Image: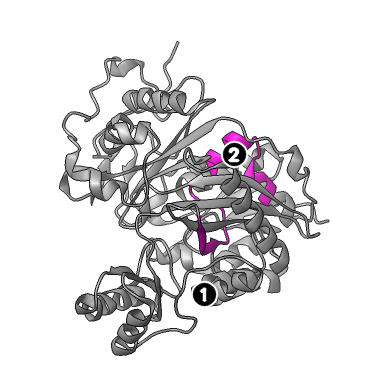
Amino acid sequence: MNKIKKILIANRGEIALRIIRACKELEIKTVAIFSEVDKDGVWVQKADNSFAISGDPVEAYLDYKNLINIAMRTRCDAIHPGYGFLSESAEFAKACEENDIIFIGPKAEHIALFGDKMASKTAVKKVGVPVLEGTVEPVMDAKEGEQIASEIGFPVIIKAAFGGGGRGMRIVHNAKEFQELFESATNEAIKYFGKGEVFIEKFVQNPRHIEVQIVADKYGNVVHLGERDCSIQRRHQKVIEIAPSPRLSDATRKKLCQTAVNAVQEIGYENVGTVEFLVDDNDDFYFIEMNTRVQVEHPVTEIISGVDIIQRMIEIAGGDKLKYKQEEIMIRGYAIEFRINAENPQNNFMPAVGTITNYMAPGGPGVRLDTSIYAGYTIPPNYDSMVGKLIVYALEWDGVVRKAARALDEFFIDGVVTNIPLHKAIVADSDFKAGKFDTSYLEKKLPTFDFEEHKSKRSIVDKSFILKGSGDLLY
């Protein structure tokens, strides 16, 4: 067992701050990195040491050779990649290993396996996981793809073979639109992932998107921490995540979670990961992909299970065994996470930038806010539009929906447009309250939402009572 003493955090924003907090509780020193536009980031001040990275604001976080060099210079014995950027780079994980630095995540070979959507589909099928009918080899030619799609039967979905996050993905309903959408998918795959290979599989109409959080140590022990419902999406991008799913039967839940555990155990996977499935109206489920990193939505699982996922990642990477057996993990209540994005729901969700002039955070029992923004913070235009995550918890589904409405109503951000009005509209919707939603929910509901009605109202608290940087009241 290698006790980790100092960690370089190869990320930025709220996840960097989240990792710093986990490390402080484990009494582990941290080194933060920051690009030129991130010099005012909260995580930069909260880390024990901070190191500037020069060059393009995005490329600077992707230059793994430089990050490894910084880790060595600052005597870090481990690197935590967070999510995004280098978190699913097998090359980065391998380079860490070659330089005697612990990569806090799975083995490079498993990152590579699950980064290849076709290879991973084949691998899990071999260990008994249900998969959708589709190609097992890359498709590069539109005519060949159209022939395959006709054999599978429309509708089909075209997916980037080496990507994720909804990029390089197109739904094709008939042969007439195949070529245009095939070219669109491959072009987007090249733009975002540098590779144009795609695969084709049967499209499930209006499924639920359910994922299982697993934790595995180096000694063959694997547990799950329940499932999350990520069905509420816009253009294949998750907007809201819920744990557990309010509409999944206990029998399906048990089978789904056990299938994920068995697959991970058979493959020999280590550390944390998320096995994602589509669930149809008959409660049949099919493997989509596995994410080999901590998920944006990990807080909802932490809240209902009591397990600190970031800390477990660090401990497992250092050689610790799992601290608990499956029967010792108790899932209790419901948690909902709302991704707070700097974007305008009334203008086709156009990303917004600018300086936050007034900020009031929600609070009270069962409310958690993971963010790195504050009054006076300028949101840079270089990164993803997500600026925070509001997480609420209650024992019952009705209670967590009411708590969400209250917390969203308290949440006030001025100076930059956000998607808070979208979240307010969702929690006020009768179908959401009844737990009736699938991946088509937002597509159907967006035209019916009145965002003016749900705009944040100006805080009634005098600005002089707002503590800059936290949103907490001074007493």
Q: Which mark, residue 116? A: 1
Q: Is residue 317 above or below residue 471?
A: below
Query: Residue at the location (32% across, 46% down)?
Result: 379
Q: Residue at x 79, y 51 (%)?
A: 320
Q: For the residue labelled by badge 2, is the local secondary structure a helix, a strand or a loop? A: helix
Residue 312 part of the magenta-drawn span: yes
Q: Which residue is mark 2?
A: 302
Q: Quadrant of the C terminus?
A: top left
Taking 411 as reference, is 83 left or right?
A: right
> In screen coordinates, is 82 left or right of 1?
left
Which amino acid, mark 2? Answer: Glu
Residue 94 visible in the shown view:
no
Where is residue 12? Give x, y as percent. Answer: 47, 51
- State yes or no: residue 116 in magenta: no
Q: How far across and down, in percent of the image, does residue 253 sit?
A: 58, 46
Query: Which residue lies most toward the front here?
Result: 282
* Magenta-colored span: 284-313
In the displayed image of the protein, which residue is found farthest to the right? 1
The disc labelled 1 sits on which kind of residue? Answer: Asp
